Amino acid sequence: MITRIRKPLLLILAATSFFATSYKSIAQSSNVITVKANEIKAEIQPTMWGIFFEDINFGADGGLYSELVKNRSFEFFTPLMGWKVLNRQRDSAKIIFVNVGSKSPYNTRYAHVTVDDNPARKLVGLSNEGYRGMGVKKDVQYNFSVFARNGGEGNVSLQIELVSAKGATIGTATLGGFTDKWEKHSVSFTSSATDERAQLNVMFKGKGKVDVDMISLFPQDTWKNRQNGLRSDLVQKLADMKPGFLRFPGGCIVEGRELETRFQWKKTVGPVENRTPVVNRWNTEFKHRLTTDYFQTFGLGFFEYFQLAEDIGAEPLPILNCGMACQFNSGEVAPLDQLDAYIKDAVDLIEFANGPVDSAWGKVRAEMGHPAPFNLKILGIGNEQWDEQYIERYKEFVKVLKAKYPEIKLVSAAGPFPDGAAFNYAWKELKALNAEIIDEHYYANPAWFLKNAKRYDNYDRKGPKVFAGEYAAQSVAIASPDNQNNWRCALAEAAFMTGLERNADVVHLASYAPLFAHVEGWQWTPDLIWFDNLRSYGTPNYYVQKMYGTNKGTSVVPITMNKEVMAGTDSLYASACIDKTTNELILKLVNTSGKSQSKSVVVDGVKRLDAVGKMTVLQSNDLNKVNSLDEPMAISPKDSQVAVKGKKLNLSLAPYSFNVVRIKM
Ligand code: AHR
């Protein structure tokens, strides 16, 4: 069980709701906001606003990864997890699971099925329940595949049936002609209905024996129609954010509860049938949200992550295990003199991503269909590690990686908390080592986010850069199952992010976490995007991220009220930037008070501004409001025009609102 609420966090959580107090504190100190559009304070990195991906909450298996069959290769704890035997009859038919051990080290089990053709009996079969059912759509093609061979005698074929939750057959196909050799066989069919909880039946016809493995069903309409592909609606939501980077594969999943179950990228590339499933560390992490059937099949592996990053225009940012298991769990470490294998994984990953096609790992990438390099530039060493044991291991990685690939920037860890002894120790040590980018995590209540809007104002400009690698406002308490993705949290994040942007010379990357959650399969809340088997929606927090990502700008310029940065006075938070490529001024203003506020904005340092600007507003009067599958756009951005008179504009900032203004210069 992860015990996350420690002392520094308790202090954070003790702070009471800021919204009530901030409302009272409006002193109307000034009605004029000044922007100096020609005073560049910092360049904004293209990576600034990105995405954190982890296979938590059915993020990959059961989520982004489109495979509909759960436990397709019978490798979960028990071979029948997710499966049911249909019409089991004594004597006449049998399904046994053979474990070939080291003969097929990646995927050791298969089903050996014996059937007769007695017409008086119903066909024996295997039925798969999917991930809380299978989401299928009317008129969409489904691609079924199986590895099969004749099991030694007779002739058995497969009758494939897609069955709705009510028991109607909504798609069928047959497959046969199995030889004595293991071969992949495929067939497609179209679903005649939409169903959120369909099941797949594989019925055995004929008389004799057959061996089957890797029973798989994918929709044709995956992202870019790729085989072994990803769910289009979910990828589209990521692409719409215009993310600067994609961090993968986590998160604590990188570490594993023990070293044995850590994430090992080499086991996630190459033919899908050779990727050995590993239990997902989130399966029983929280007793209040047990998910005992949660495994990682690695169908979504490192090749697919790199490809996804490329598809959505994001820098790939892999995080690798540094010889440490999760310190909230076993905390196992690899001895310092046995780190070679871990470091080699990092060295080889760079070759996999960037190496020529005739290098050992570059060849693997090319054979998987991507001869061009993925252009990896940043790599993380360890996830959320802390204390001496991390620094000792990090140093070993740096020695080797910097000697071989000096151009790759390395991300190091500052632990799980945004302050306190472990955090301070990490910063002191990493600074002394000239670390390039330090990964900070903060899960705290909304008040913390407002209080910390100036967090980076006094960071050393010459020190390591910051990756705000995981953050999210928690409405109740960290990782509480009652946390909500409500407007209060999203608005606090929007306000805090003005401080990240204002300090873009220090903060080079930032990402909300976690990213995805299945409405029935989740373990951790809040999360940016929620989905069921057919639908998905962005939370208010998602729209905050999206508004930052799509209004990034290239350079920070000052925005002040009474000559002070806007980080809480009159409950207002603001940042400003220009986009040199489009020649636009971009203002972000957050009103955390429950009162509308009228402000004039005077823009200095420009020859002229267009007479009309665009204003995008995310707003609700109800701080507890959330989006949902049924009301996905309850809180969503609304566009309007704003008049500009010369170099001045009058803004009315609605209560509890996040506003983005874009004006051509
Ligand atoms: O985002 C959920 C978890 O929170 C991540 O896996 C971990 O890095 C952090 O503790």
Image (cartoon, helix red, strand yellow):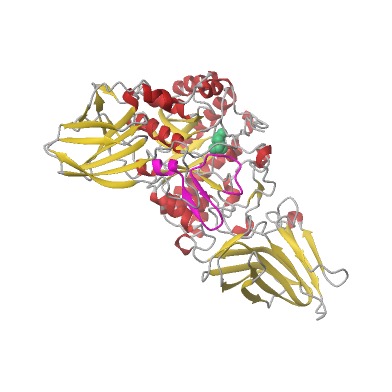
Which residue is painted at 54% across and 44% down in the image? 54
Answer yes or no: is residue 52 visible. yes
Residue bounds of the magenta highlight: 519-545
Task: Report if residue 175 lies within the magenta region.
Answer: no
Which quadrant of the figure has residue 179?
A: bottom right
Q: Looking at the picture, how far across and down is residue 252, in whole percent?
A: 58, 37
Q: Position of residue 577 (x, y in %)?
A: 26, 35
Indicate yes or no whether the magenta region holds residue 533.
yes
- Nearer to me, 117 or 213: 117
Residue in the foreground of this view, choosing between 438 and 364: 438
Q: Nearer the viewer, residue 161 or 322?
A: 161
On-image quarter of the N terminus: top right
Indicate left or right for 471 with 150 as reference. Answer: left
List the single residue furthest toward the right. Answer: 91
Q: Is residue 536 left or right of residue 460?
A: right
Q: Residue at x 17, y 32 (%)?
A: 603
